[in-house]
């Protein structure tokens, strides 16, 4: 097997949920199979010692290796259901090791309650995160220096990622694949596993998935409207009227449910659609920008960079360097 580009650790410990370990492992394996001559990931099942790990479902497995001096690019923390105080006493070496890995540049992904390891390590202090809803109140009390985002299915803060449910954990894994390998590969895998049947087929909405995890039916209707008409001009007054709200109430409820203003959510929809086109078509940047609802390329580029940290031209060149000089006009 050729050398892998990225090293990934899937941390296992007593009480971890096997489904949140192996679903991520198989997704990264699928990414490798798409590019067999250019392996993207080397994945280790990582345990704190050489003893068998007792998973939540009752099965016992051994890690591939133990935590030590090896550095990783990404560390995935499995979901856990049990006594957090007890498990931290069983594995006291995990939090300082995790803090060291983060300081060395590793990205940390806590699947659902797995994020408590990052909180325990102190690397989330002053930051934002989400977690499985049943554990949210407990974590708010245990880690008061963290802003817990109850309405967000996925949260990213300073290279630390978190999710709050089984579907959200798959979205999170796909989001991480996009971060490491680009949107084209991630979108291809997302289509194969049909991770959310509500998504529009021709739009790569991995980064939008977290904004649907709420119970406000009126805002869901507004999001349905925006998902279908994101290329059109938005009049908040008109949209609010469509769902029977005043403009002021609509903006307040939308932000409470999703964590975003309606206008910013619309920008995210447009940018995700543009990213898909940049990676999968040869259309010019101007054509793509106008196609997702912007009147000029300058406005499109400004919004695109504010959400991705790169310009559309830079984004395309990273995905398709051999095409960038002919398609970026």
Image (cartoon, rainbow, N blue to C red):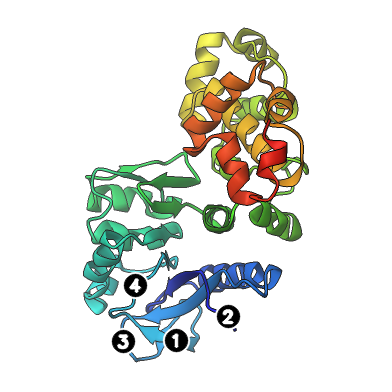
Which mark, by number, is residue 207? none
Element marked by disc 1: loop
Q: Counting residues from the N terminus, which is met first, the one under dot 1 or under dot 3?
A: 3
Say above or below: 201 vs 11.
Answer: above
Residue bearing mark 1? 64
Q: Counting residues from the N terminus, which is met first, the one under dot 4 or under dot 1?
A: 1
Q: Residue at x 42, y 53 (%)?
A: 161
**Badge nearest the viewer, 2 or 1:** 2
Which mark, by number, is residue 71? 4
Task: State how far apart marks 4 and 1 are (Cα).
Answer: 15 Å
Q: Are marks 2 and 4 in contact (CB under 8 Å)?
A: no
Asked whether residue 151 is in view, the answer is yes
Which mark, by number, is residue 2? 2
Asked whether residue 204 is in view, the answer is no
**Badge nearest the viewer, 2 or 4:** 2
Quarter that holds the C terminus: top right
Drawn side of residue 51 relative to residue 58, left or right: left
Tell me the crowding category of disc 2: few under 14, some 14 to 19, or many 20 or more residues within 10 angstroms, Cα based: few
Element marked by disc 4: loop
């Amino acid at each position: 097997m050729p050398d892998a580009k990225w090293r990934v650790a899937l941390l296992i410990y007593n009480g971890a949920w096997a489904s949140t370990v192996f679903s991520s492992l198989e997704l990264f394996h699928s990414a490798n199979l798409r590019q067999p001559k250019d392996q993207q990931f080397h994945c280790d099942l990582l345990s704190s010692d050489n003893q068998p790990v007792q998973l939540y479902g009752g099965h016992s497995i051994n890690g591939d290796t133990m935590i030590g001096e090896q550095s990783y690019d990404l560390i995935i923390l499995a979901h856990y259901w049990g006594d957090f105080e007890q498990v931290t006493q069983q594995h006291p070496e995990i939090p300082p090791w995790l803090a060291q890995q983060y300081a060395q540049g590793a990205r940390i992904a806590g699947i659902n309650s797995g994020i408590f390891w990052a909180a325990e390590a102190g690397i989330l202090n002053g930051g934002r995160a989400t977690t499985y809803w049943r554990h949210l109140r407990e974590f708010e009390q245990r880690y008061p220096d963290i802003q817990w985002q109850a309405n967000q299915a996925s949260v990213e803060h300073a290279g630390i990622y978190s999710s709050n449910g089984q579907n959200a954990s798959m979205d999170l894994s796909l989001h991480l694949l996009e971060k490491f390998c680009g949107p084209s590969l991630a979108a291809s895998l997302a289509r194969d596993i049909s991770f959310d049947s509500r998504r529009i087929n021709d739009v790569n909405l991995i980064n939008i998935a977290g904004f649907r995890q709420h119970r406000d039916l009126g805002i869901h209707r507004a999001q349905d409207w925006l998902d279908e008409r994101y290329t059109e001009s938005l009049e908040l007054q008109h949209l609010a009227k469509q769902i029977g709200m005043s403009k002021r109430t609509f903006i307040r409820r939308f932000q409470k449910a999703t964590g975003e203003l309606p206008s910013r959510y619309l920008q995210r929809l447009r940018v995700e659609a543009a990213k898909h086109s940049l990676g999968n078509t040869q259309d010019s940047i101007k054509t793509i920008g106008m196609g997702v609802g912007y009147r000029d390329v300058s406005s499109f580029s400004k919004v695109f960079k504010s959400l991705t940290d790169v310009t559309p031209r830079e984004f395309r060149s990273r995905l398709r360097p051999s095409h960038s000089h002919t398609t970026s006009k």
